[in-house]
Amino acid sequence: MKISRDNTNKKKIINNISSKIGLPSSYAKKIVDDVILILISNIVIKKIFKIKNFGTFSLRKKNKRIGRNPKSKINHPIIERNVITFKSAENLKKKLNTYVRK
């Protein structure tokens, strides 16, 4: 059995907000843009962003290291960088599990 992945993009989120709430798409776009901006600015400033009953976004620094191309076996340096991690809240996990099991 092949599982297809239907990635959600910003446009789909904007359309869902617009259709469910009845707002014009321009207002829904502004809401989505503002939420993303708040998320990014809090992660940059505070290094962590918690949403109750949803989860926690946090900024983590990865050190530089040596990586290897598995096909050519050539080593390449991987530069140090910041990555965002997400840990889901227990309530979100419970809700997801009840919907998935049906």
Image (cartoon, grey):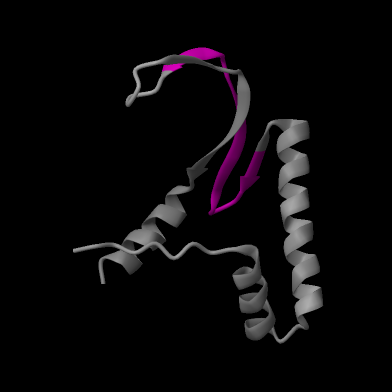
Residue drawn 34% across the image and 68% down it: 99
Q: Residue furthest left?
A: 1
Magenta-colored segment: predominant secondary structure: strand
Q: Is residue 96 left or right of residue 84?
A: left
Count of numbered circles in the view = 0
Q: Residue at x 34, y 64 (%)?
A: 4
| Residue 59 magenta-highlighted | yes
Q: Is residue 55 above or below residue 46?
A: below
Judge by depth and name the residue closer to the eye, 96 or 31.
31
The part of the chain drawn in magenta is: 49-67
Q: Is 25 situated above or below 81?
A: below
* Image height of 22 relative to 83, above or below: below
Residue at 61% from the left image edge and 35% from the top image edge:
58
State the image coordinates of residue 57 (x, y, percent, origin top left): 59, 41
Residue 37 coordinates in the image, percent (x, y): 77, 50
The image quadrant where one finds the N terminus is bottom left
Q: Is residue 39 magenta?
A: no
Q: Quadrant of the C terminus?
A: bottom left
Q: Residue at x 65, y 70 (%)?
A: 11
Rendered image quadrant of residue 64:
top right
Residue 89, position as x, y percentages in the image:
48, 48
Task: Please state which of residues 7 and 41 is positioned toward the viewer in this rendering.
Answer: 7
Q: How far across and down, in percent of the image, does residue 39 sit?
A: 71, 47
Q: Is residue 93 above or below residue 14?
A: above
In the figure, is residue 19 to the left or right of 74?
right
